[in-house]
Image (cartoon, helix red, strand yellow):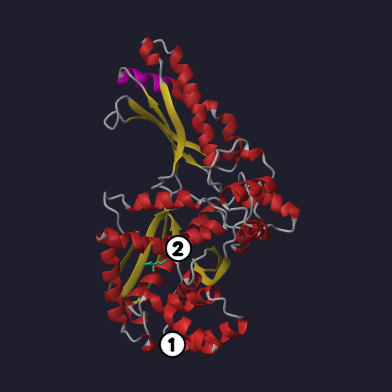
Amino acid sequence: MIDPVNGFSKFSKNEKISWISKTYLRNNPEAENILKQYWNSNEELQQLHDEFTENTISNFYLPFGIAPNFLINGKLYALPMTIEESSVIAAASKAAKFWLSRGGFKAEILNTEKIGQVHFLFSGNEETLHKFFNSVKPVLIEAIFPLEHNMKKRGGGLVSLELRNKTNLLENYYQLHASFETVDSMGANFINSCLETFAEVFKSEAKLFAEFSETEKDIQIIMSILSNLVPNCLVRAEVSCPVDDLCDVNDHISSSDFANKFLTAIKIAEVEPHRAVTHNKGIMNGIDAVVLATGNDFRAIEAGVHAYASKEGKYSSLSHASVEDGIFRFWMEIPLALGTVGGLTSLHPLVKLALELLQKPSAKDLMQIVAVAGLAQNFAAVKSLITTGIQEGHMKMHLTNILNQLNASPSEKSSIIEFFRNEKVTHGAVVKHLENLRS
Ligand code: MEV
């Protein structure tokens, strides 16, 4: 029976480790070694990471890789990607090279609206509530002036503020629905601070509104929070080329067969949710990797993107393809609320480096780069799926992981990698080959 712990957050790092080791890890000294081997010897850097979050006892490494040769709107980028899955960066690099010789990627920003809501309950006359809202709106807007000061200097701030009746969804449920422009920041803190100010002023002003009855004066604020559903913070990424340029003699498939199969694969993802989820997961392999490397909130991006994928009432593909007049087109429109200032962007040394590598992008530039990473990843996955199958490339890239699991020595590794250059990689085949080598 384990007793609850009190004051865990007040323990020193060593005390925290001793406690979890004693309580959950049978005092295994190896556990302590594993945790401590990831500590950074640079104490300042370690402290910086400790302070990103709470109760830190170690660091969790993810690979930081590069996918070069991304031609986006005529500019060549090398994309920083933080991801643990083998073959994702290789696939992105391959797709980048493929489209480099076919005009590259085009990307454009369609909109940059962010949304926040104050959710509240009001029991009374709706018309009087509207009257109150119209009279208090200038007061609400003025109340956030101090918060908006810096944002306005950068060209952002509150864009609109509406009262919305949601009583068809829930009894007495209304919202203050606000939209914002947050320029180069993701804007979460700014938006949430504005919303909490709106809520406070809205509630207190209601008490003074002469036309409200006593019950109406008692507006119940439930919560104030930004929405990660940002269907109007939208970016489009696209590639196109003549169908005839899609394949060459080495591809074992004709260009027109490839185009037809590709279009059918996309159609399947458009109409069949099981396939759509996996298809979009492939897109997120590219998106999350760049989002993480640039210090953005991948959970917010994931939530917003998947909600957007269901916007027609059924989960569907985020990407689409067509062939018209002999031209193959492949595109995607996707909501991405990203920032290049604020948050981790000026704190995490690798994030700073990633942004420098991307030539210090604005949030709009980053939205385009990230959307392209998603489209490229999707192209690579679907291309493999409809030609060689995904396992050929995936298992080749996964070979090193298998060898590490089997504790292969450096010389065993290089001999086996050489052997499997032209052989099909399966776990069983690698085990067998290693056993042969060792005997
Ligand atoms: C694996 O991480 C991603 C894929 O399953 C995506 C897809 O099926 O399109 C290969």
Tell me the residue that label 1 is attached to: 423
Amino acid found under the numbered disc labelled 1 = Glu
Q: Contact, CB < 8 Å: mark 1 with mark 2?
A: no
**Residue at 56% over, 46% down:** 185
**Residue at 45% over, 68% down:** 105
Tag 2 or tag 1, which sits nearer the N-term? 2
Instruction: Report x, y in % for residue 413.
Output: 57, 82
Secondary structure under tag 2 reads: helix
- Residue 277 visible in rendering: yes
Magenta stretch prevailing secondary structure:
helix
Report the number of discs: 2
For ligand 1, tell me if the residue under mark 2 lies within 8 Å.
Answer: yes
Q: Quadrant of residue 426?
A: bottom left
Q: Which residues are magenta?
A: 126-135
Front residue of 50 and 82: 50
**Residue at 28% over, 80% down:** 256
Tell me the residue that label 2 is attached to: 285
Instruction: Report x, y in % for residue 187.
Output: 53, 43
* 369 is higher (above) or lower (below) than 115: below
